[in-house]
Every structure is written in C-alpha cells, then in structure tokens.
Image: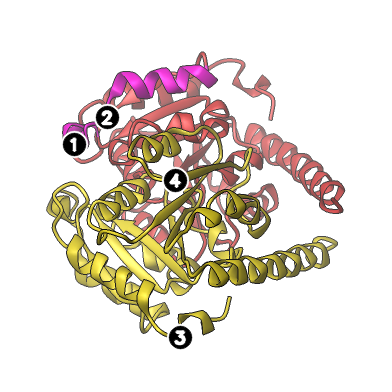
Chain colours: A red, B yellow
Amino acid sequence: MTTLPVVQKILSANDAIAAENRAALDAAGALGVNVMASPGAGKTSLILATTQRLPAGLRLAVIEGDVAGSIDADTMAAAGIPVVQINTGGGCHLDAPMVRSALPHLLPAGVDLLLIENVGNLICTAEFALGAHVNLVVGSTPEGHDKPYKYPGMFAAADVVVLNKADVAAVFDFDLDAFQRGVRMVNPQAPIFVLSCRTGEGLEAWVDWLVAACHAEGRRSIPV
Amino acid sequence: MTTLPVVQKILSANDAIAAENRAALDAAGALGVNVMASPGAGKTSLILATTQRLPAGLRLAVIEGDVAGSIDADTMAAAGIPVVQINTGGGCHLDAPMVRSALPHLLPAGVDLLLIENVGNLICTAEFALGAHVNLVVGSTPEGHDKPYKYPGMFAAADVVVLNKADVAAVFDFDLDAFQRGVRMVNPQAPIFVLSCRTGEGLEAWVDWLVAACHAEGRRSIPV
C-alpha cells in the first residue's frame, strides 16, 4: 500500500511535463500523435505506409520508442524520415520526459506531424500522457476481435482506432462487427479505420483523416 | 528516484509468495507453467489445443489472467477444464499473490499440470515470478520475426518458446531463421517449438515436451 502515493507523484510529474511537450508542439505548429498497439500489430508499417501517402510539403518526424534496439528507427532513417530512437531499457511505455528529451532534435527543423511510436504494449502505454494531441490505437486482425473487451483501458483512451491486416481477416475468423461493438462499449466516438498496410486497402481514408487533423482549427485546445 | 526502494520491496515480497506457491505446487505434485505472450499471439488457443492432446489421466487446471472480462475462462469452462479467472483491474501482469489466491480453488481436487495464462504483455509479465516451474513464451508469425530483438527480457526469461501461427508465416514474410537467431542471442538453451494451433502442425512435439516436463525427476529443484 506504500506504492500509491509514489505512483501518483510520478503521474502528476509526468502530466506536468506532458503539458510542456504539448506547448512545445503547439508553438512549432506540429500535431503530435501517440501511436499505441500490441507488439507486431503494425505500428511501424502504418507509419511507413502513411508517410508514402502524405501530401507533398507536409513535414513529418518520428520518435521511435522501444525496449531495446533501433530496428524501426533504422527503417525510418533509411526512408529519409527524421527520427529519434528512445530505448526504455526495459520500461514498458514511453513517458513525457523521454519525449521531451527528443523534441529539440526534431522540432527546430520544422515539423507539421510528429508520430510517436510507443512501446508495443496494450496496457501501460495508455496510462502515461506524452503531450500528444491524438491517441491512436492500432489493432490487427491476427490478434482477434476480442481485444477491446480484454484491454478496455487502451481502447477507451483512443481518439482514433486503426484495424490493420484487414486483408487476412478471414484467415483468422476475425469478426469485424464484434470488434467494432467492443470498441463502442468503451469508446462511443473514436473513428475506426479498417485497412491493410500490406495491400494498401483503406489507407486513403485514414490518411485523409490524419491530414485533416493536422490542419484542424482549434486542435490546440484538446486537453493533454 | 524515490520509487526504486518501493519497487524492490514489492519484488522481494512477490518472490517470497512465489516461493510459497512453488511449495504448494510441489506438495500437490503439480507442474506450474507461466504462459506469457503478446495480446493475441494464441495463449488460449495453445492451451486448448494442448489439452486436447494430453494423455488420459493427466489432470489439468488453468488460471486465466486478464485485465478485464472472462472470455478465455468461459472458453476453458465450456471445454470442461477446471479454471479460475483473475482480473487484474488494469494491472499489466499477474503476480504471486494473485496466483496464491487461486491455488486453493484448484489444487485440492488433484492437479498434475497447472497452466497459468498471464496477461497479454511482452514486457511486464517477465518481471514478476509466480512460482511456476516453467516460463513459456508464445510468439506468433503475424507479430514479425523481430520480436526477440525488441523484447529481449521476455525471451531471456523463457524456459521454452512456442512460435504459433506457423501456417501463415509466408503471408507475413516471417523469417524463421532470424527469429531463432534472435532468441538465441539472449537465450542459448530454451527449446523452440514451431507450430500452428489452427492446423495442428507441430503440436505433438510440444505436447511431448510438456508431458515429459510433468514427469521429470528433479524438476522441483528448479529455482523460482
């Protein structure tokens, strides 16, 4: 029972730094997106597929969060995308101080859209605000349609949901209606985009939504 | 910096209770297996496919750990398997006290094999001993072959690794050699079973290994 006060202090310190991150993003005119998912749902694939479809002139940057290694950051760098790798050294989520340490390496060059790929984890990542404007949760059909029922906190925290690997839904007996009902049980409003990064189906609608969010008036008033 | 001592206290209290759980399992003659994986890798499918292939007379019981809900426990109960559901209420892993609370509901009836399905999480679950004899990590081909490189702590903690969904490896350009090399980088010894719960391929070798572990002399000396 001694842990609760400490956790509260950590969370409130994190929230204060998340607010600073938000202010830095707003000052730079950048939309921050916190990309969360299970390991292997396709966060990196979605980021790469999205970048290939962004309108010319929209300046993208990426923060890669991983327990260890720089596989995804290397992939981003090879694609010419400005990227900072954060290794949590065993930690199961990014936090606001980690993101704060990355921003000075990215924002000064000019950024319209900052995609922050969180650690692969469908629980802990939702609990730590980073300062992003948008919480994106990426599901995938091989994981099964029961995930919103089993991980309600994550889907409740989503501002937008992407369901990836739609092309192989039939292989996994994935019930899209059950998935959507599960999301709606905890989240009445978040748009749900069904797509496949492998085939490209459904990506256009998602990218249109994201670009509109970049340009939206008033997005800076979204609370952290 | 104030958190570290508290975390150490929690871990050492957890380890003490894990040792009690181990003693209770040993007294009952039950092999405990801590089943860990990402969400949707196929922990429940593996447990169900395994139970269908266990030799007659081997008495199985299951503990289901989930953030919320009882979907998997309902599935087990429908299959006639003695099961206890533990909901962590947002917590990202099972711990030894949770398992301790479940044992009196299962062991008195006679158990040879206790499969403990942990919360879907490739990071936090490895950090909390439950008292099980065997740490099983379940990967799946849709997650990608890079997971051992990205989540080394989990694969280092494994006594045995199962790679599920082998039947769809080609769909996901899954490189089995890269996966195996990744496991070996952090874990020189754990056997790796490649199988598909959907088609049944590879299950026999895995079940043979598990049954042998149930019967092995001296397994009670495995440290917690």
Q: Name the residue under label 1.
A: A168
In the image, taking residue A78 as reference, residue B157 lies left or right, namely right
Quarter holding residue B188? bottom left
What is the C-alpha distance between the residues marked 3 and 2?
A: 51 Å
Quarter holding residue A126? top right
Q: Which amino acid lies under the numbered mark 2 shown in the image of this protein?
A: Leu
Q: Which amino acid lies under the numbered mark 1 shown in the image of this protein?
A: Val
Residue stretch rendered in magenta on the structure: A166-187
Q: Which amino acid lies under the numbered mark 3 shown in the image of this protein?
A: Gly
The subunit carrying tag 4 is B
First-in-chain label (2 vs 1): 1
Q: Is the magenta stretch mostly helix, strand or loop?
A: helix
Quarter holding residue A22? top right
Give the crowd class for mark 3: few <14, some 14-19, many >=20 residues within 10 Å: few
Mark 4 element type: loop
Mark 2 element type: loop
The subunit carrying tag 1 is A
Q: Do the residues labelled 2 and 1 touch (CB within 8 Å)?
A: no
Q: Which residue is drawn at 39% across and 68% down?
A: B149
Q: Name the residue under label 2.
A: A195
Give the crowd class for mark 1: few <14, some 14-19, many >=20 residues within 10 Å: some
What is the C-alpha distance between the residues marked 4 and 2?
A: 39 Å
